[in-house]
Image: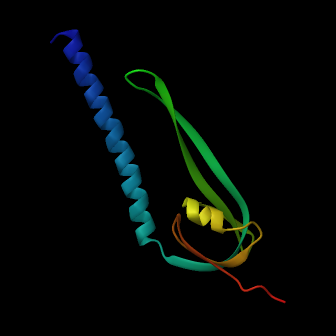
Amino acid sequence: MPYAQFALYSFIAMFLLVLAVILTVIIGQRYKNSRAPRLSVRAEVIKKRAQVTRHLHWGPSLPHSQKRVTYYVTFAIDGGQQLELWVRRRVYHQLKQNCRGTLTFQGTQYLDFQKAPRSR
């Protein structure tokens, strides 16, 4: 087998192996979340962060950059525990720091946050 053909087959095999590992991790996490109990706990929003990643792509003429933002919110749960969850952009912007309410989550998946009515 010529070296070029061997290199191509090796590349394809490595690509498929990496793809299989990534899919296994994603499917495994979703499976664990689906089997975890759905919990609703009193919580407070203590921290918000947006993680920006940039990817450089080479096009036919010039390279261009693509930006992706991932949003996380950290909740303090009654009892002293902290829980950081990935949330959608809309949720990230709706939640305010120091806001109290009821957090609903399943495993590592954010489901809902109902703000507590303000006490007077």
The residue nearer to you, when weighing 97 against 74, is 97
Q: Report which quarter residue 53 is drawn in.
A: top right
Name which residue lies at 17% across and 10% down.
2
Q: Quadrant of residue 22?
A: top left
Foreground of the two, 80 or 120:
120
Residue 51 location in percent, x, y? 62, 47
| For residue 10, above or below residue 104 | above
Residue at 33% in and 40% down: 19
The quarter holding residue 94 reads: bottom right
28 left or right of 116 in image: left
Which quarter of the rendered picture does the C terminus lie within?
bottom right
- The residue most toward the top is 2
Q: Residue furthest right?
A: 120
Counting labels gives 0
Residue furthest bottom in the image: 120
Q: How is the image coloured?
A: rainbow
Q: Residue at x 22, y 23 (%)?
A: 9
What residue is shown at x 59% (from left), y 66% (from top)? 91
Q: Nearer the viewer, residue 57 or 70?
A: 57
Residue 116 vertical placement versus 11 (above, below): below
Q: Is residue 85 above or below residue 5?
A: below
Q: Position of residue 76 (x, y in %)?
A: 72, 69
Task: Indicate the quadrant containing the N terminus: top left, top right, bottom left or bottom right.
Answer: top left
Q: Report whether 80 appears left or right of 67.
A: right
In the image, is residue 35 above or below residue 47?
Answer: below
Q: Residue furthest front?
A: 61
- Counting from the top left corner in percent of width and height, residue 81 is at 70, 68
